[in-house]
Amino acid sequence: MQKILILDFGSQYTQLIARRVRESKVYSEIVPYHLSLNEIKQYGAAGIILSGGPSSVFKKQAPRCDPGIFELGIPVLGICYGMQLMTHVLGGVVAKSQKREYGRADLTLDHRSPLFRDLPKAVPVWMSHGDRIEKVPAGFRAIAKTGNSPTAAIQDLKRHFYALQFHPEVVHTPNGLQILQNYLYTICGCHPTWDMGSFIHLAEEEIAQTIGKGKALCALSGGVDSSVAAVLVQRVIGKRLTCIFVDNGLLRKNEAQTVMRTFKKQLKLNIKKVDASEQFLSKLVKTRDPEKKRKIIGKTFISVFDEAAHRVGEVDFLVQGTLYPDVIESVSVNGPSATIKTHHNVGGLPKRMRMKVVEPLRSLFKDEVRKLGVALGIPGELLYRHPFPGPGLAVRIVGKVTTERLDRLREADAIFDEEIRVAGLYDEIWQAFAVYLPVQSVGVMGDERTYENAIALRAVTSQDGMTADWYEFPHDVMKRIANRIINEVTGINRVVYDVSSKPPSTIEWE
């Protein structure tokens, strides 16, 4: 299988590079920049992309890759910091720019290049850099410029080295996907053959090799990720997979009943329910910090599964629906990226676990998981549900989690969901949910003064959850939702709407 290796130097856009390559039906994999040359060779990559990054090549601790990658005979594409590093390592000169360049810039193509095949002479691009190329390395020549960067792109045709000062992977560079595809198809000789069918084949081989003749439990939550993971693993090991659905008391309205009905009747999974709501709530009652909530929930989940495993019999593996964005936002596993928050599937779990974790979806983005689900024959009404966090409503209650707050939030969330569906807007929105705010304000109901809490509504559009914009509701729909919540949910006298995007905010509040 043809593969593109992406060396991560800490750019916030590294995951977007991987997405664009995969959208072009070429498999890509992100690895740490400090991977050894021997490890890189073992991947057998058709091309290597050096990502951008926040550092400067002048810094003493600036990230460096093994310079031997430039002697492998493999096409290399450097982006932003990757361009500066390539220039620096190969003998060129990088210098501080007198004027930093951030945001939109107009790129003029100076020379015909396979990288810019079929592009117009001038294209808008997205810049984000403070250093610039003063002198290209031997064998290179400049192939594009902007008003502030006379050397905005370079190439060495003989060695198949290319570098860009701008970011082709972001939507703000309209021709960026075509540039990347020119690199993939024309320069690296890749063919657009990778799809979910290919992934299923490789994933099944890995599952069979990992689990062998062992037994597995699946942490089935009822969401898209764990559902797809369960069906995929079941295809390989059959009845040796037991799905455990934990009612943690943090689920949406009627969620437990719906989950059990769907998985038993529609997907024919071997599923057992464990009611551990009191156990979870008793441990959360004194906790206000969101990170502590996640860690408590993670530890409790493992404890519950251990108990369930004893009842099932000897079990060797725990299957989880961890996705790529979960991994990236939780720990800097691929490079010097900043930790944003701990995700239930990948953080806060005890170091000593009786079961080994199997994460068959760990390399996929959410939209890829849905495509995989379609290929596996999972019903669309399950696949296209809005994402729901592993810690459930605990991270949609700001502050202390109580039974009263959970009940109020469930009712508000159910109203929000119902009205969005009635208005025919559900499929336009990536994720919509209510948040309980421990903020009291004065109101008037029935000529009487009230001093009650508020509900915040959050709805965003996104492709993969890595970035998101708030959804612009029709005013009549928003008015109806707010009126119903205030009138029907006890203890709520105010509704507000979250109009922040990601970044700088996250989608979830905690």
Image (tube, grey):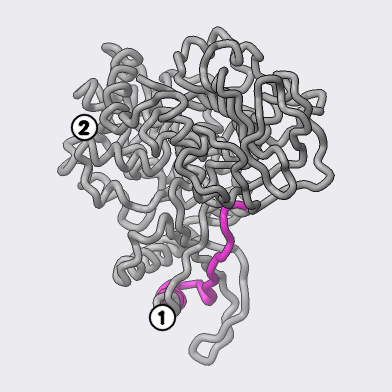
State yes or no: residue 493 in magenta: yes
Location of residue 287 in the rendering, given as x and y in whole percent from the top left corner: 60, 47
> What is the total number of numbered labels drawn onto the structure image?
2
> Residue at coordinates 65% horizontally, 25% vertically from top-left?
140
Residue labelled with disc 1: 476
Q: Earlier in the sequence, mark 2 or mark 1?
A: 2
Return the x and y of residue 23 as percentages of the image width and height: 39, 39
Q: Amino acid at mark 1?
A: Asp
The magenta stretch spans which residues?
481-503
In front: 258, or 29?
29
Secondary structure category for the residue under label 2: loop
- Kind of residue indicated by mark 2: Asn
Q: Position of residue 36 (x, y in %)?
A: 60, 11
Q: Disc 2 marks which residue?
A: 270
At a point 52% along the width and 76% down the height, the residue shown is: 493
Toward the right, the furthest residue is 98
Q: Circle 1 sits in a helix, a strand or a loop, which is it?
A: helix
* Residue at horizontal 41 percent and vertical 61 percent from the top: 410
